[in-house]
Structure formats: structure tokens, C-alpha cells
Amino acid sequence: MVSSTHFSGKPQPDRPVGGAAGRLAALLGMLARRLGAGQSSTRARLGLVTLVLGCLLCLPAWTQEPGIRNREANFDYVGDHVELGVRFDVTLKQGLEDALADGFSLPFSYEFQLTRPRLQAWWGNLSSWFEPTARLNYRLSYHNLSRQYRLHLGSFYRSFSTLSEALTALGVVRGWEVLKGTDLARDKSPMAGRVRLLLDVSQLPKPLQLSALGKDDWELSSSWVELKRAETPPADGDAP
């Protein structure tokens, strides 16, 4: 049985730098080595210096701001339920990376909310005290002994060698079953809904909840994203 017990220790200093920032750092490193090795002319040296300065000026535009951004959100009717497929890009703020390094596990929640039919959505919200129609809970941690990141779903987990890989896996959900056994799903009635992914501070230990209260680093959430009906591939007989 997998436990979500916090792990002690910190990741090694060679923590990966992802995305555009990592590529920019590699480029600047290469240019610096070339400058140090010397060039055949003053013009070449000046050209390299100009390029380095230009890269530094463009750094804020090239680096991705921390946050959770939607890339895909769709649904389809399958048997007696509805299946969701969602994809987000997740980038942690520095304070959250530090918390992982210090041994804290970070709870994330996918939330689905039915919005139409309006009467059914209203009654569902009222009966659940306005909680989401469905929720899927993950937990991200760092295991110091194996130097790997772990993404937990219930008692199961997957291991990743880099934070970037773990966040990519966190941001993708396929085949999430909601509205099980409902007439809406069985009859394939017209429906609408929305989803979001957030850092669920309410699942943190109480002392950490209090310390995280009001701190910007611990506020991480996507906006609500409207679901679209997944496109069904044409049958062989319907192909042009």
C-alpha cells in the first residue's frame, strides 16, 4: 500500500530546467564557451556579445510563467457514463518546487461540474452543497532515496526521473468516467460541463494550510474550461 507520507531531503542541484528557459540557458552556455575560447576577429566577438545581450533581453518573453493552462477538454458518451479527456500544461511556482524539495507532497484535484441541463445541474449542485459534480485527486511528491518524483492516484503511483515529466503526466487525463448510471449518459442527452485543475490547499496538513494562507506561491489553478464533444471518427462506410 502506497502512503502519501512526506519524504525528507532535497533533490540534487542538477534539477532540470524545462521549456524555453532550458533551451535559452543551453544557448547562452554555448555562446559563453565560444567567447572564452576566443574568435578570429573583433567583429565576431562583437557579434556574439550582441547576440548574448539580445537573448538576455528576450528572457522574460521566452520563459513560461508558472500556472496551469488548458490545451484540450472534451467528453463523449460511453455506455452508461460520460468519459472526459483533458490536457493541461502545468508549471510550478518556485515556492512549490521548494516545498517538494523539502519533502512535502502537493495535492492536485481535477474538478468536473455539470452546467446543462440547467435543472439537473442546479439540483446536483444543491444536493451536493455546491461541491463539484466529480473530483479526481492526485498527489505529487519527491522520493529522496530514489531521486525520483512520484505521482500518486489513490494507492497507485508512477515514478519519473524529472519534475517536467511528472508535471506532463499530471496534466493529462483520459477516460475519466463521470455521471455513471444516469439517464443523461444512457440516453446521450445534450449536456454541457466544465473542468479545471488546481492545487488543492484544503488537502494539505492543517499547519501547512495556515502557513500557505495568503501566499501567492500556493495559489495555483486553471480557469474553468468548457468541455466540447469529442469528434467521432467516421465509419469505414462513411469515408469519402
Image: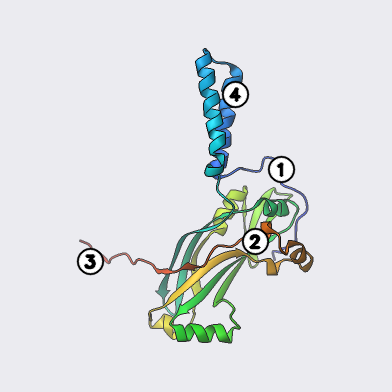
Q: CA distance from mark 2 to mark 3?
A: 48 Å
Q: Which residue is mark 2?
A: 219
For this view, does 133 lie left or right of residue 9?
Answer: left
Tell me where residue 88 appears, x and y as whole percent. 51, 59
Disc 1 vs disc 2: which is toward the camera?
A: 2
Give amino acid for label 4.
Arg
Which badge, 1 or 3, is on the more N-terminal residue?
1
Q: Which residue is mark 4?
A: 33
Tell me where residue 199 appears, x and y as whole percent. 63, 63
In terms of image quadrants, where is residue 23?
top right
**Can you see residue 111?**
yes
Residue lying farthest to the top in this orientation: 40
Front residue (pair 50, 230):
50
Q: Image point 34% across, 67% down: which residue?
A: 232
User: Is 122 located above or below residue 69 in the figure?
Assistant: below
Which badge, 4 or 3, is on the more N-terminal residue?
4
Position of the N terminus by quadrant: bottom right
Element type at marker 1?
loop
Which badge, 2 or 4, is on the more N-terminal residue?
4
Give amino acid for label 2.
Glu
Q: Image point 51% across, 84% down: which residue?
A: 122
For this view, does 208 lie left or right of residue 157?
Answer: right
Local crowd size for mark 4, using a 10 Å CA cut-off: few (<14), some (14–19), many (≥20) = few
Give amino acid for label 3.
Asp
Find residue 238 and name its label: 3
Q: CA distance from mark 4 to mark 3?
A: 59 Å
